Image (cartoon, rainbow, N blue to C red):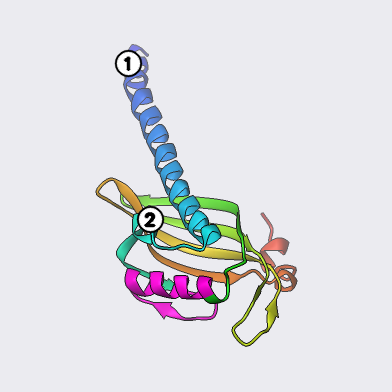
Amino acid sequence: MKKILILLGMLLPVLSTNAQSKTDEVSAITKQVDEMVNSWNKHDHSNMKNYSTPDCSWVNIVGMWWKNLKEVEYSTQFYHTNMFKNTTMVNKGVNVRIINPTTAIVHFKSFVSAFTTPNGQQIPGSDDIALLVYVKQNGKWLMTAGENVVIDSLAQKNDPVLHMNK
């Protein structure tokens, strides 16, 4: 019994440190997502290098694939100058799954307000979800890939998971 207590006494601090470390990592990643939201709401993406890798890629909501930071920053800024200049983005939730000490998957839910397309079509605000991949480089979490989609509220009612035995 004494050996078990000694072993538990040695393991508990390690487990506690690991849990705290994971919480710190999730917090650091969430702050990086917040930086992306701040860039959107300021309509200025010149600081993207602070939260993205140089080789990051992004597939946007209509399937355009931008393959490095230069393309992602240029295209995002282009749309904010021309189409999203009056929009706001609201963070509706960040779910972080640490894959290993240097890789994380993030599901990021947001609401983007209404906007007008270049051809004059009015698009209502929508709930969106993005899948983001973060890597830790030089002690900092950076987005290396992302893709976002509109959440179709009508289709959500037919999600089979809603009727699954749990």
Q: Between disc 2 and disc 1, whose residue precedes?
A: 1
Q: Which mark is residue 6?
A: 1
Q: Position of residue 73 (x, y in %)?
A: 39, 69
State the image quarter where residue 152 is shown.
bottom right
Examine the rendered structure and indicate whether residue 154 appears above or below residue 49.
below
Residue in view at x 42 percent, y 71 percent: 58
State the image quarter where residue 145 is shown.
bottom left
Examine the rendered structure and indicate whether residue 40 appears above or below residue 84.
above
Task: For the N terminus, give its image quadrant.
Answer: top left
Q: Position of residue 71 (x, y in %)?
A: 36, 75
Examine the rendered structure and indicate whether residue 31 appears above or below residue 117.
above
State the residue in front, 145 or 16: 145
Q: Which mark is residue 51?
A: 2
State the residue in front, 121 or 26: 121
The magenta span reads 59-81
Residue in view at x 36 percent, y 30 percent: 17
The residue lying furthest to the top in this view is 2
Q: Position of residue 86 (x, y in %)?
A: 62, 66
